[in-house]
Image (cartoon, rainbow, N blue to C red):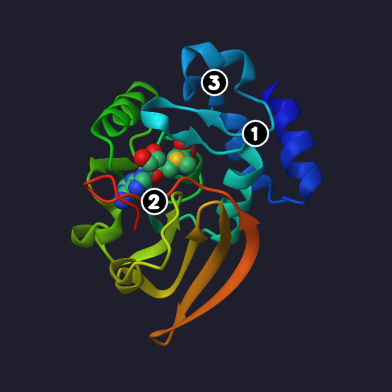
C-alpha cells in the first residue's frame, strides 16, 4: 500500500527526487494514524487525529517537503507536530528536526512514537509555535503545518541566511502556501499552491 501511495499519489504528480520518494517508502504512515483509520493510512487524503486536528494528505506533505529543497546538513523547524508524520519524513532528509506542537496530548504522543521508532534526530516540545524555537535558531528551513492569517515575525527572524520557509497563509478555508527565501537579509515571498490547513491557534485557542 505504501509503494502504491508513493507511485500513484506522489511520483505521478511530479515529485521526482529519489531521496524524497525513499523517505516516503521508509516511514510507516500507518504508525501515525489513529487505530480506527489504519486501513485508510495510505489513502489520498488527510485523516483526523486527536484534538480535532489532522494528519495532512501525503501529496501535500511531499509537496511542502520538496519546496524546502533540503540538504543533508540542514537544521529544520516544524510548527505543528500533529501526528509526527511530517517530522519523520523531514528527519530522513536532513541533519535534525525541531518540532513544536501546541496541544500537549499530541506533542507527547508524537514524541513517544519518535522514541519508539528510533527517530533520534527529531527534537520536540509543547508550546506556541508562533514564537518558533529561539534556543535552536537559526534554521536552514522552516515548515508550518497550521495556518496563520499572517507570517509570524519570530519565524522570519529565526530563518538562516539562505534559508527557506513554507507556510499556509490566509483565513480558513482559503489559504495559499507561501514560499519565503532569505538572501542577504532580505526575504522574498511567492505563493505556490492554494491549500486548506487547520488554523494556527494561540494558547487560549483563538486563531492567529
Ligand atoms: C495539519 S495538523 C498537523 C500535521 C502534522 N505536521 C502531521 O504530519 O501530522 C497542524 C497541527 O498544528 C498544530 N498547531 C496549531 N496551532 C499551533 C501553534 N500555535 N503552535 C504549534 N502547533 C500548532 C495543531 O494542533 C495541529 O496538530
Mark 2 residue CB less than 8 A from any atom of ligand 1: yes
- Residue labelled with disc 1: 45
- In which quadrant of the rendered view does residue 27 lie? top right
Depth check: give the residue in front, 57 or 64.
57
Q: Position of residue 52 (x, y in %)?
A: 41, 31
Quadrant field for ligand 1: top left
Residue 174: image x %, image y %? 58, 57
Mark 3 surroundings: few (<14), some (14-19) or many (≥20) residues within 10 A: some
Please give the name of the residue rendered at 62% of the width and 14% of the height, measured from the top-left corner. Answer: 39
- Crowding at label 2, few (<14), some or many (≥20) Cα neighbours within 10 Å? many
Kindly identify which residue carries mark 2.
Answer: 78
Task: Give percent across and percent down for residue 207.
Answer: 35, 53
Query: Looking at the image, which is closer to me, 159 or 57?
Result: 57
Query: Which quadrant does the C terminus fall into?
Result: bottom left
Q: Residue at x 54, y 68 (%)?
A: 179
Residue 81 in sight: no
Between the residue at mark 3 and the residue at mark 1, the CA separation in whole angstroms equals 13 Å
Above or below, 143 relative to 59: below
SS category of the residue bearing label 2: strand
- From the image, state whether disc 3 or disc 1 is nearer to you: 1
- Residue at 58% x, 34% y: name it: 46
Label 3 vs 1, first from the N-terminus: 3
Q: Dot 1: few (<14), some (14–19), or many (≥20) neighbours within 10 Å? A: some
Q: Residue furthest left?
A: 135
Quarter occupied by residue 77: bottom left
Callout 3: SS: helix
Left or right placement of residue 151 versus residue 60 in this view: left
Amino acid at each position: 500500500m505504501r509503494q502504491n501511495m508513493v507511485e500513484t499519489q506522489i511520483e505521478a504528480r511530479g515529485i521526482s527526487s529519489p531521496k524524497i520518494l525513499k523517505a516516503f517508502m521508509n516511514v510507516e504512515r500507518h504508525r501515525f494514524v489513529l487505530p480506527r483509520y489504519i486501513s485508510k493510512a495510505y489513502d489520498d487524503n488527510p485523516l483526523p487525529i486527536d484534538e480535532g486536528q489532522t494528519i495532512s494528505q501525503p501529496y501535500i506533505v511531499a509537496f511542502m517537503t520538496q519546496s524546502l529543497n533540503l540538504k543533508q546538513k540542514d537544521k529544520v523547524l516544524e510548527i505543528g507536530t500533529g501526528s509526527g508524520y511530517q517530522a519523520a519524513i523531514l528527519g530522513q532528509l536532513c541533519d535534525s528536526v525541531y518540532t513544536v506542537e501546541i496541544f500537549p496530548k499530541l506533542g507527547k504522543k508524537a514524541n513517544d512514537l519518535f522514541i519508539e521508532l528510533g527517530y533520534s534526530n527529531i527534537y520536540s516540545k509543547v508550546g506556541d509555535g508562533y514564537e518558533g524555537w529561539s534556543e535552536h535558531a537559526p534554521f536552514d528551513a522552516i515548515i508550518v503545518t497550521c495556518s496563520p492569517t499572517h507570517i509570524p515575525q519570530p519565524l522570519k527572524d529565526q530563518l538562516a541566511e539562505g534559508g527557506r520557509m513554507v507556510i499556509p497563509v490566509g483565513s480558513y478555508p482559503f489559504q495559499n502556501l507561501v514560499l519565503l527565501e532569505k538572501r542577504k537579509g532580505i526575504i522574498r515571498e511567492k505563493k505556490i499552491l492554494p491549500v486548506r490547513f487547520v488554523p494556527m491557534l494561540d494558547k487560549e485557542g483563538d486563531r492567529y
